[in-house]
Amino acid sequence: MIGVFDSGVGGLTILRGLVRELPGRSFVYLGDNAHAPYGDRSPEEIYRLTLAALERLFGLGCRLIVVACNTASAVGLRRLQQDWLPRAHPGCRVIGVLVPMVEAVTGVPWSVPLAPAGRPLGAARTVAVFATRPTVESGAFVREIGKRAPEISVVQQACPRLVPLIEHGGSAAALREAVEHDVDALLARTHGAAPDAAILGCTHYPLVQPLFAAALPAGVRLLSQPAVTAASLRAYLARHPDLDAAHPAPARFYTTGPADAVAGLAARFYGQRLAFQRAPG
């Protein structure tokens, strides 16, 4: 059983990609809607809430968990993987959505040793990152891309208006204006030069991916997390067959918030009405 965790409902875009890519696997989704959004919280709060959510999913029988939350992946995941997980749940694994995007944009798998400076690179030279403010401020994309491919220049843009607009059903015009504003702000810092690739570093952004595609200059390679994460998870399971126990079963959905209210919002992200249950514990 594979767990998928997000601070809210945005991670359902990731889950939808995983279900399409990996039929025959059993997934359990947990949204920490009672404490969303994480963007207003301190790094220590994010770490504590993420740890509690992972404990819930391990308690439901998961051995592998995908943290489908960019804020949690950027702020707390490495510490959890290195300090807590080996002691609390040896033999289990937790992976995030940030690493697959870094692999995709650099063309360097995580298993490859760190890149020496000046290594020829058959990937992007300039990468734009559109994300929430906490993800941008964490510097995680800049740091991890730099480790894999230090010759890549990374330009980040926080998009604070997008998540509230998406969750509250903002109009098409308002969403388009917000995306165009953020793209223009990023291009102003590159003096109008188009990036080679752009990362949509928030699980909400697949819902407005066509707006980013229209606002960015022609030819920019747009990387969206659901497809990239799904392909990465398939490869991860191939490398870790002990975690790849296929037990076909319908996905289950849990929330720490009010189940009925969450179900109504979740349909916008998953494409169909979902039956949420109150999370145990």
Image: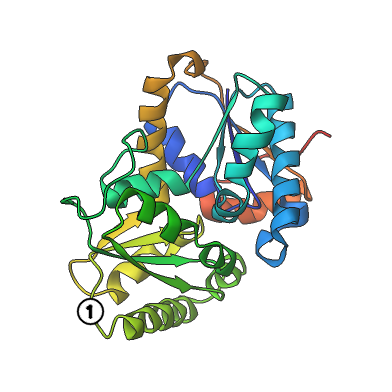
Above or below, 15 relative to 181 = above
Give x and y (percent) for residue 69.
57, 50
Residue 205 appears in the picture as rendered: yes
Q: Nearer the viewer, residue 27 or 275?
A: 27
**Among all residues in the image, which is located at the extreme right?**
281
Q: How many marks?
A: 1
Task: Say what amino acid the circle numbered 1 marks.
Answer: Ala
Judged left or right of residue 264, residue 144 is left
Above or below, 79 relative to 199 = above
Q: Quadrant of residue 264?
A: bottom right
Q: Residue at x 74, y 33 (%)?
A: 56
Q: Nearer the viewer, residue 127 or 200?
A: 127
Q: Residue at x 55, y 21 (%)?
A: 249
Q: Quadrant of the C terminus?
A: top right
Within-10-Å neighbours for mark 1: few <14, some 14–19, many 20+: few
Give x and y (percent) for residue 127.
31, 64
Give x and y (percent) for residue 251.
58, 30
Give x and y (percent) for residue 85.
65, 30
Q: Quadrant of residue 156?
A: bottom left
Q: Residue at x 42, y 41 (%)?
A: 17
Q: Residue at x 74, y 25 (%)?
A: 59
* Residue matched to label 1: 193
Colour scheme in the image? Answer: rainbow
Residue 271 appears in the picture as rendered: no
Judged left or right of residue 27, residue 208 is left
Judged left or right of residue 30, residue 157 is left
User: Could you say whether the residue bearing mark 1 is in a helix, strand or loop?
Assistant: loop
Q: Quadrant of the N terminus?
A: top right
